[in-house]
Amino acid sequence: MTVRVRFAPSPTGMFHVGGARSALQNWIFAKQQGGVFVLRVEDTDAARNKPEWTEGILSALDWIGISRGSYEGPYFQSQNAGEHRAAAARLYESGRAYYCDCTREDVQARTGSQYQGYDGYHRDRGLGPGPGHALRFRTPDEGATVVVDLIRGEPTFENRLIEDFVIARGDGSPVFLLANVVDDMTMGITHVIRAEEHLPNTPKQQLLWDALGVKPPVWAHVPVVVNEKRQKLSKRRDKVALEAYREEGYLADAMRNYLMLLGWAPSGDREIVPWSVIEEEFRLDEVNPSPAFFDEKKLRAFNGEYIRALPVAEFVDACQPWLTGTETIAPPPWQPEEFDADAFAAVAPLAQTRIAVLSEIVPNVDFLFLASPLIDEAAWAKTMKDGSGELLDDAVAAFEALESWDAESLKSTLEAVGAERGLKLGKTQAPVRVAVTGRTVGLPLFESLEVLGRERTLTRIRAARLRLP
Ligand code: GLU
């Protein structure tokens, strides 16, 4: 039997990092089993779906390595509506489902103040189809439904505690629970690997598989992803969109490595490992069922390591979207014609060791391309003290006299300027850095000045000097 798995996102919002994690787990499992990965877009919630969300999912998957054309699909759940209705009709005709026109209030009036689930009122009343008549599944009164779950063992659900749930609404449209089962059935899915949030649906869905006469799939409910407060990551509260991480400058390789560590780890003490190792070592049945903490700080640190490991040329390429701007990434503060690729290439290795996300490249190099630096006024106020004006005067004079404009000479020259005033290099270079780059932190100063060049460096220091007493 060929293993067939599916990833079945609903296009109702930005693509969630938890979804990306499940997609990758499905992807690797299929690969390891010599199986097939199917992408199915569950687009039946017409009120909440938007085509751009679907496009966002496809492109985010592509970004983390599940590339278009390398999987089966995308299928769209809405295209299978005929099958969903046919299955609902079969369940009705075989007596496994019945019509009911009770409102929640009706049920409540019969059963007491708190709604405890449907009371089975219409089970044997023979109500036929009609407007406003929902179709309910007749759950068994006895026995238990045992879910075989690769991660959670065999969660067992007593059937008498499962209410006769709705499978088609009063307007005849099948609900998610049924559509999802029918799609998995028609697509020959053998393993359903999905988020833990769906575990409560699983006994109901397994009953539907049984009632439709098809052997249910093997399930694997992967752990919920939580924030530092152990709350489920939510799009209203947390940064959950894969796209947001991409735009901030996380590398796809770092991201997918990190996502795979949510509930699992490679052998040894390693966490940062090549994708090929993950593909080889990952075991779905080793995934820890407990909630997985999405630690953004750790992800950042990971990303920094991935950035530092890039060959410089690849780092330069990877920075391009932030250097030029794209449809979704804001353009940098300089004009395209102000950008100087050679100057950038000269400082790129210095930046590469210092940034954790690629978007940080911009504030590190903007001083090179802007006609005058963007002065951070708070940094200016903190740095420019009594005596800074004279210090800058001395620096200008010493720099003007330099024969060779290189980092070494610049450093020893400024060091000497400071020494005359009894200042260490750190204190001496701070006002120069703010004058030239506008900031107190950044790339190594003297290499920066070398690349910026004599003219521009001196102009900036002089301009800063004019602002000082
Ligand atoms: N469309 C469902 C969701 O996005 C997935 C259901 C499933 O994987 O079975 O939550």
Image (spheres, rainbow, N blue to C red):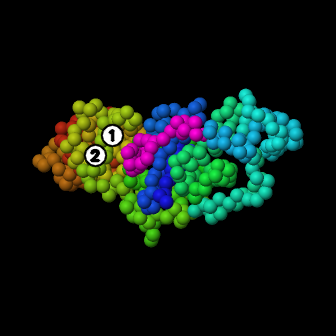
The location of residue 362, given as percent across then percent down, is 34, 41
SS under mark 1: helix
| Residue drawn at (67%, 33%) of the image | 172
| Residue drawn at (75%, 50%) of the image | 139
Is 162 left, or right, of 392 in this rendering?
A: right
Q: Does label 1 point to a residue whose CB lies under 8 Å from ligand 1? A: no
Image position of 130 with respect to 1: above or below: above
Q: Which mark is residue 321?
A: 1
If the image is split into quadrants, where does the C terminus sit? top left
Label 1 packing within 10 angstroms: few (<14), some (14-19), many (20+)? some
Q: Amino acid at mark 1?
A: Pro
- Residue lying at the far top of the rendered structure: 131
- Residue lying at the far left of the rendered structure: 403
Label 2 packing within 10 angstroms: few (<14), some (14-19), many (20+)? few
Is 227 left, or right, of 308 in this rendering?
A: right
| Residue drawn at (42%, 48%) of the image | 71
Question: Is 450 contained in the magenta span?
Answer: no
Q: Which mark is residue 302?
A: none
Q: Nearer the viewer, residue 385 or 276?
A: 276
SS under mark 2: helix
Q: Report the span colored magenta.
A: 58-84
Q: Are marks 2 and 1 in contact (CB under 8 Å)?
A: no
**For residue 42, which quarter of the picture?**
top right
Instruction: Measure the C-alpha gap from mark 2 to mark 1.
Output: 8 Å
- Residue lying at the far front of the rendered structure: 93
Image position of 400 with respect to 411: above or below: above
| Residue drawn at (26%, 53%) of the image | 312
Q: Amino acid at mark 2?
A: Asp
- The residue wearing badge 2 is 317
**For residue 33, which quarter of the picture?**
bottom left
